[in-house]
Amino acid sequence: MSEDSLEREPSVAGIGLQSLEKVRADGNVDGRMPAKRVASGSPIPMMLAEIERVYRFFDDRFFGGTLPTEVALALEPAHVEGYFCGRRWRQGSKMLGHMAVPVTVLAGGVDEVMAVLLHEIVHLRNYQVGLPDCDPVSEYHNCHFRDVARLVGLGCADRHPKRGYGDTALTDKARRAIAALKIEPALFAWSVGGVEKVR
């Protein structure tokens, strides 16, 4: 782990939270070219900021602040329920992981979004410590995934012959943690027109 990764300024899609707030305040990122304003009323920047806040909270609450402070967090129109890739982004020798919550889960509200995010955070943690927890081809989630998922408040369904322990749901432990966040339900009460939830 490099010294740069020890700094505790998480990032949303590569821009640190303080920088993101500065963009909102003055349209400028650390003296660089002004950012274009997003159409007023767009929920996406607020959702991403909340997902980053939740990521930091889960990191502190369940992993003692040991997760990477730089990871690209995204809402994507994916055909899966979520995904994590540890080496998706590269700039020179620097690698950055990518974690996505698909827009299709927004229709499920806060609990569904939090369940997917926590599921993907388990993959990130296992990747970080070098613990293979999912076959990249078959997506079979093994017992390493199951064990860490249970520790952070995800219940795993009985082992599925093809997906292993990949079907997860929030337990009371996770729900108590999420309640402490006081997330505004309306923030994740959006759905994408014409996109059905994939299950």
Image (spheres, helix red, strand yellow):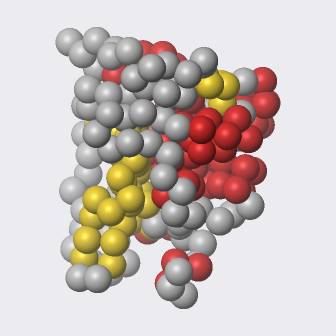
Question: Residue at coordinates 60% horizontally, 38% vertically from top-left?
Answer: 143
Question: Residue at coordinates 53% horizontally, 80% vertically from top-left?
Answer: 1
- Residue that lies at the very extreme toward the front in this rendered image: 161
Quadrant location of the C terminus?
top left
| The one of 78 and 157 positioned closer to us in this rendering | 157
Q: Is residue 41 left or right of residue 156?
A: left
Question: Picture coordinates of residue 28 (x, y %)?
Answer: 32, 69
Question: Picture coordinates of residue 150 (x, y %)?
Answer: 70, 35
Question: Picture coordinates of residue 7 (x, y %)?
Answer: 58, 78
| The one of 129 and 76 positioned closer to us in this rendering | 129
Question: Residue at coordinates 75% horizontally, 36% vertically from top-left?
Answer: 177
Q: Quadrant of residue 3?
A: bottom right
Question: Picture coordinates of residue 98 (x, y %)?
Answer: 36, 54
| Above or below for 162 versus 83 | above
Q: Quadrant of residue 15?
A: bottom left
Question: Residue at coordinates 49% horizontally, 27% vertically from top-left?
Answer: 164
| Above or below for 99 versus 181 | below
| The one of 171 and 139 positioned closer to us in this rendering | 139
| The one of 109 and 134 positioned closer to us in this rendering | 134
